[in-house]
Image (spheres, rainbow, N blue to C red):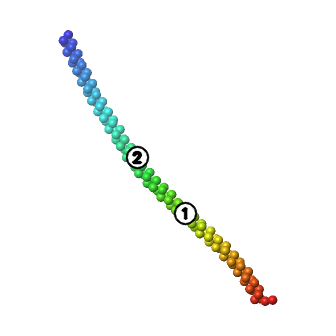
């Protein structure tokens, strides 16, 4: 009986050692896999940071363009008001010119005499 107990203990020790070795190998494999996952995650983070920076630059350009459009629209509105004012002045001057033409015709008619 003593021999079977000793043999059993030796087998148990061998199996325990084998399990320990397998566990160490598996932990090494998991560590390698996690290191690869970490490397990939870091690269994705770097890529996202680049995209975030580019997005911020594009947003700034869009905001600048919107501001320029608002400024240009305000300028165009002011130019339209100025144009309307000039058109009104031209109409007024045309009316005055028509009155002067009438007066001139009357004056020339008086000069030509009866």
From the viewer's side, name the closer residue of 24 and 59: 59
Q: Kindly indicate the quadrant of the structure image that contains residue 31.
A: top left
Q: Quadrant of the C terminus?
A: bottom right
Q: Quadrant of the N terminus?
A: top left
Q: What is the C-alpha distance between the residues marked 2 and 1? A: 38 Å
Q: Is residue 57 left or right of residue 112?
A: left
Residue under label 1: 74
Q: Is residue 49 left or right of residue 87?
A: left
What's the mark number on residue 48?
2
Return the residue found at the far right.
Answer: 114
* SS at circle 2: helix
How packed mark 2 is, by other alpha carbons closer than 10 Å (few <14, some 14-19, many 20 or more), is few
Q: Kindly indicate the quadrant of the structure image that contains residue 109.
A: bottom right
Position in image of residue 92 (x %, y %) = 67, 74
Residue 44 to residue 54: above or below? above
Return the residue found at the far left.
Answer: 2
Residue 51 to residue 21: above or below? below
Q: How many marks?
A: 2
What's the mark number on residue 40?
none
Q: Residue at x 53, y 60 (%)?
A: 70
Position in image of residue 39 (x %, y %) = 34, 41
Q: Residue at x 46, y 53 (%)?
A: 59
State which tag comes first along the sequence, 2 or 1: 2
From the viewer's side, name the closer residue of 75 and 9: 75
> Do the residues bearing badges 2 and 1 touch, measured as CB atoms within 8 Å?
no
How packed mark 1 is, by other alpha carbons closer than 10 Å (few <14, some 14-19, many 20 or more), is few
Residue mark closest to the camera, 2 vs 1: 1
Q: Is residue 30 left or right of residue 111?
A: left
Q: Residue at x 51, y 57 (%)?
A: 66
Residue 1 to residue 97: above or below? above
Position in image of residue 32 (x %, y %) = 31, 36
Position in image of residue 5 (x %, y %) = 21, 14
């Amino acid at each position: 009986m003593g021999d079977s107990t000793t043999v059993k203990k030796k087998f148990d020790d061998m199996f325990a050692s084998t399990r320990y070795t397998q566990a160490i190998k598996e932990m090494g494999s998991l560590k390698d896999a996690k290191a690869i996952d970490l490397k990939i995650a870091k690269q994705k983070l770097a890529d996202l940071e680049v995209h975030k920076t580019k997005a911020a630059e594009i947003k700034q350009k869009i905001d600048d363009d919107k501001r320029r459009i608002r400024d240009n629209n305000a300028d165009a509105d002011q130019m339209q008001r100025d144009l309307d004012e000039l058109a009104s002045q031209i109409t007024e001057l045309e009316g005055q010119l028509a009155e002067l033409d009438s007066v001139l015709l009357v004056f020339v008619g008086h000069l030509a005499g009866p």
